[in-house]
Amino acid sequence: MAARTDRTQDPEIRAALLTARRGQAYFSRKLAELRDHELDAPSLLPGWTRRHVIAHVGLNARALTRLTEWAATGVETPMYDSPEARDAEIEFAATLPTRALRHLSAHAAVHLDVEWRDLAPEAWDATVRTAQGRDVPASETVWMRTREVWIHAVDLDNGGSFRHFPAELVDALLTDVERVWRRKHDGPLPVLEPTDRPGATTEDTGGIRVRGRAADLARWATGRGGAALLERVGGGELGEPPGWL
């Protein structure tokens, strides 16, 4: 029997799906490298253990599956009932037995991938709603998942690094950060100057100029630290970036 493949033939969606799937493989590999007792250790996210990160990533896959099913059926299926319900679900899932927590991560990822694979080509344009209340096409779920799996693989604090990310993903993250900063914040914003991307600089908004490798800029701009790897043009302390997600 021939293997089933994505129904969509859109080259941009197919390329995006590949990056998301590579990210899932990266997250799964970093998780598999951890022994069961190591899941209780802190993650790189304040107040969260590795268990919380794993629970969140698994439940995020379920939430995005609901959006994909919404696109497929036309029946509104929100990501979460409420922010409070989302937080409570993560806290509960983080207490699951280790085997069940690992199963949640793996099974939820497979389920989402199957829903993406079987989604009709025209359904990728269907409008769904994010947890923040933004109306977006269903194709946006792929980018939403891509951010989750790649970045949270780093948050597991098990050797993951933004420098492992594909160059096109790093560039997309920097573009996304700038877009969200502009939507959420008023006034001057940092200007990011990647030294390994000749001529690439985010639009000048009158804020501080930050220079460094693109991967290190993405790490700092997404709130994962790394200020010591960067240069604040003109000198001085770099500090924390504006809030992203």
Image: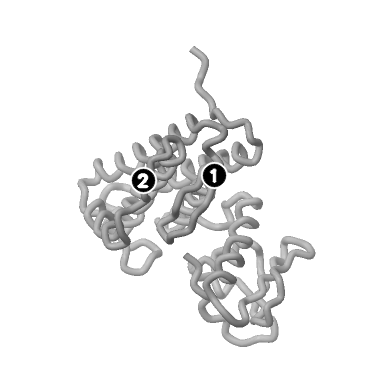
Of helix, strand and loop, which one carries label 2? loop
Residue density around tag 1, few if under 14, some if 14–19, many if 20 or more, within 10 Å: many
At 35% from the left and 53% from the top, the residue drawn is 56
Left or right? Give the position of 243 relative to 102.
right
Name the foreground residue: 50 vs 94. Answer: 94
Image location of residue 158, percent across then percent down: 42, 55
Between circles 1 and 2, the one closer to the viewer is 2
Image location of residue 13, percent across then percent down: 60, 40
Residue topped by disc 2? 77
Residue at mark 1 to residue at mark 2: CA–CA distance: 16 Å
Up the image or down, 174 lies above or below 208; here it is: above
Residue topped by disc 1? 139
Residue 33 in view in this figure = no
At 53% from the left and 25% from the top, the residue drawn is 5
Of helix, strand and loop, which one carries label 1? loop
User: Of the residues shown, which amino acid type is indicated by label 2?
Assistant: Thr
Left or right? Give the position of 31 relative to 136.
left
Up the image or down, 191 lies above or below 156; here it is: below
At 64% from the left and 80% from the top, the residue drawn is 232
Image location of residue 138, percent across then percent down: 51, 44
User: Of the residues shown, which amino acid type is indicated by label 1?
Assistant: Ser
Image location of residue 117, percent across then percent down: 49, 31
Q: First in sequence: mark 1 or mark 2?
A: 2
Residue sticking out furthest to the right: 199
At 51% from the left and 40% from the top, the residue drawn is 21
Up the image or down, 22 lies above or below 178; here it is: above
Disc number placed over residue 1 in the picture, else none: none
Name the foreground residue: 167 vs 115. Answer: 115
Left or right? Give the position of 38 relative to 194.
left
| Among the 4 quarters of the image, the one containing residue 103 | top left
The mark total stands at 2
Residue density around tag 2, few if under 14, some if 14–19, many if 20 or more, within 10 Å: some
